[in-house]
Image (cartoon, grey):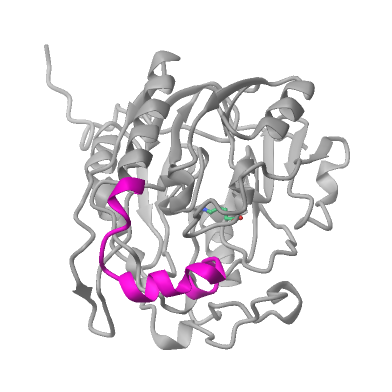
């Protein structure tokens, strides 16, 4: 049998990466890992989004470890989630658990350590057959994509397109220490300026030819414009106006679940783009998480951060009874998974995944 080298063979045109939306039948997915994770330094764009009561924790522990008991329980929950997806016939792959508790520097600044490879949604923007590595605004996340390079090289060899957005310098001029922590959407004072493009992939959601993005403390307008120009005429990138006091990642706010079904955060979304006029738009019930549950990096609204296996089946946090009832009433088949320890680290099922391949094609839903 002839040995084909996809890197050089022009006959190889198919890509193992192909995913256009949040709901086509899932075939392959990256699920994050907490191995090697570190507490990030409490720099400006971190302080802007972590719950106020956790700021001391970040200041005291930057570059160190999270409580071992929490990471161990969260790691077990991640394994259970991965095993569920595998049992449904999905190919699950994992990034490398790099040691993040090592200081690093660029010519301009230094960081006591990294963060984790738990949230592939933040770092990899997958659009069709292309993987885009995000230019993330947190200095602690500067090298986060390295944990995925083994996977990305494999996808590249087999035909995927792969690009990294311009590597940002993350100079002090990118940050606005006087950011507005009440209504940044009114004042326009976010933790990041427009000094250079930055974005986290999780500030985008995909509906075929249309992507929806929010300006957040880590994603600036230059970052959104970079994605728009890079994707070109085949795609439309819409800016969603969001009334969030600490915006970071659109996927606990604005969640297209299936064609014609849009789930919204009742506290944050004031106006919906008119292209959704013919969709069934519903507001999520209040999260069921107890007040005293320790969350380091998000609000309890990560309840909304659900993950579609296909148009009908949705993975939901097992303790979110009101949301489970609500989604069943809406016609979904709910797969409950316990994830209350994972969410301490800033994200739920949508955040800890990057859907590499879903069976479907590029189309317009509007
Ligand atoms: O509290 O809305 C959710 C997503 C974080 N990755 C929040 C953040």
Compared across the picture, whether 331 is left or right of 291 comes to: right
Quadrant of the rendered image holding ligand 1: bottom right
The vertical placement of 79 against 71, above or below, is above
Compared across the picture, whether 280 is left or right of 248 comes to: right
Compared across the picture, whether 234 is left or right of 45 comes to: right
Q: Residue at x 34, y 75 (%)?
A: 60
Q: Residue furthest top?
A: 1
The vertical placement of 153 against 335, above or below, is below
Q: Residue 210, image x and y in percent?
A: 67, 45
Q: Nearer the viewer, residue 183 or 55?
A: 55
Q: Residue at x 72, y 72 (%)?
A: 185
Q: Nearer the viewer, residue 201 or 153?
A: 201
Is residue 114 visible in the rendered structure shown here?
Answer: yes
Compared across the picture, whether 317 is left or right of 142 comes to: right
Q: Quadrant of the C terminus?
A: top right
Query: Magenta region: which residues?
Result: 46-70
Magenta span main SS = helix
Q: Residue 64, image x and y in percent?
A: 25, 65
């Amino acid at each position: 049998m002839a040995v084909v080298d996809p890197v050089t063979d022009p006959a190889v045109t198919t890509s193992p990466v192909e995913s256009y939306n949040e709901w086509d039948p899932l075939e392959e997915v990256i699920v994050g890992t907490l191995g090697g994770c570190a507490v990030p330094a409490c720099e400006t764009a971190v302080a802007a989004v972590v719950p106020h009561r956790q700021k001391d924790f970040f200041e005291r522990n930057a570059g160190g470890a999270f409580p071992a008991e929490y990471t161990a329980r969260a790691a077990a929950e991640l394994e259970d989630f991965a095993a569920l997806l595998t049992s449904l016939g999905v190919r699950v792959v994992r990034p490398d658990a790099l040691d993040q508790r090592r200081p690093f520097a660029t010519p301009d600044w230094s960081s006591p350590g990294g963060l984790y490879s738990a949230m592939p949604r933040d770092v990899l923007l997958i659009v069709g057959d292309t993987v885009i590595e995000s230019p993330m605004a947190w200095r602690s996340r500067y090298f986060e994509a390295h944990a995925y390079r083994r996977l990305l090289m494999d996808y590249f060899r087999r035909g995927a397109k792969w690009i990294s957005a311009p590597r940002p310098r993350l100079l002090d001029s990118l940050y606005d220490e006087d950011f507005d922590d009440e209504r940044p959407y009114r004042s326009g004072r976010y933790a990041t300026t427009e000094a250079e493009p930055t974005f986290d992939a999780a500030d985008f959601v995909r509906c075929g030819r249309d992507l929806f993005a929010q300006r957040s403390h880590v994603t600036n307008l230059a970052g959104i414009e970079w994605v728009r120009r890079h994707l070109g005429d085949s795609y439309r990138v819409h800016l969603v106006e969001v009334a969030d006091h600490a915006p970071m990642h659109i996927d606990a706010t604005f969640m297209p679940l299936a064609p014609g079904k849009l789930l919204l955060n009742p506290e944050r979304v004031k106006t919906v783009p008119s292209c959704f006029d013919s969709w069934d738009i519903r507001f999520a019930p209040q999260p069921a998480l107890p007040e005293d549950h320790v969350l380091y990096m998000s609000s309890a609204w990560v309840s909304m951060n659900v993950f579609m296996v296909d148009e009908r089946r949705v993975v939901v946090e097992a303790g979110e009874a009101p949301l489970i009832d609500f989604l069943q009433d809406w016609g979904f088949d709910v797969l409950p998974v316990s994830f209350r320890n994972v969410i301490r680290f800033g994200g739920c099922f949508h955040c800890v995944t990057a859907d590499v391949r879903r069976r479907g094609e590029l189309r317009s839903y509007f």
